Amino acid sequence: MIWSECPKFSKETKTQRCWVHKIANVLDKLPKRLQPQAKKLLHDMMQAESKAQAEAVRDEFTEHFDDKYPKATTCLKKDWNDLVTFYAFPARHWLHIRTTNPIESTFATVKQRTRATKGAGSIEMAETMALKLILEAQRRWHRLRGYEEIPAILNGALYIDGCLEDNPHQEMVVNG
């Protein structure tokens, strides 16, 4: 099935870009001597308490670097809305959804083992090995902070800058 055809993944599905990768891509477009200063601003953006504060730091970054390094500022601005999607979720989830590194580390383990064994011999064996490695990696996963808020999110709860907003149209979530 194609993701766009899946009912749970509609046009209303929010996309979050990885801040770790974006920071690396932006820094790659700056000279080494400016990277510590730029990295601090980029981290300030990512860790801002509100979307408005993140945008203010982005504007400061742009003002400081755009004249000499437009590729860096263009890279930062590209997909900006997808970088700040996490502000529409509970603040306790932000740590988990700003980066794809936890997902990537799980698949890196699978990739590394597959390379070390020079392939698994068959597709069935490869799938079995991947499943076993992922199940083993799962033992080290941490529970999502604020996991108890997931039912509210699925029922349309509205979060602004990580805080639940009153939404009279939202269905009540009943624990039972």
Image (spheres, helix red, strand yellow):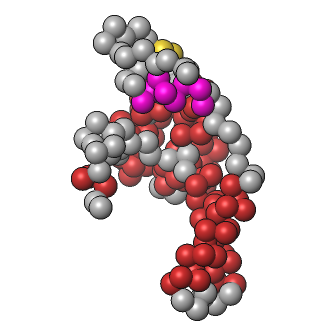
Query: Which region shows up in magenta?
Result: 147-154
Q: Is residue 56 visible?
A: no
The location of residue 125, given as percent across then percent down, is 59, 83
In percent of the image, x 61 and y 68: which residue is there? Answer: 131
Q: From the viewer's side, name the closer residue of 10 and 43.
A: 10
The image quarter containing residue 106 is: bottom right
The image quarter containing residue 76 is: top left
The location of residue 172, given as percent across then percent down, is 42, 14
Magenta stretch: dominant SS? helix
Above or below 98: residue 110: below
Q: Residue furthest right?
A: 140
Above or below 153: residue 65: below
Q: Is residue 148 visible?
A: yes
In the image, is 61 to the left or to the right of 176? left
In percent of the image, x 28 and y 36: which residue is there? Answer: 12
In percent of the image, x 43 and y 33: which residue is there? Answer: 84
Quadrant of the drawing holding the N terminus: bottom left
Residue 148 lies in the magenta stretch? yes
Above or below 9: residue 152: above
The location of residue 46, given as percent across then percent down, is 54, 34
Q: From the viewer's side, name the closer residue of 124 and 111.
A: 124
In percent of the image, x 50 and y 47: which residue is there? Answer: 18
Above or below 15: residue 48: above
The location of residue 119, given as percent across then percent down, is 60, 88
Residue 49 lies in the magenta stretch? no
In the image, is 133 to the left or to the right of 162? right
Quadrant of the drawing holding the C terminus: top right
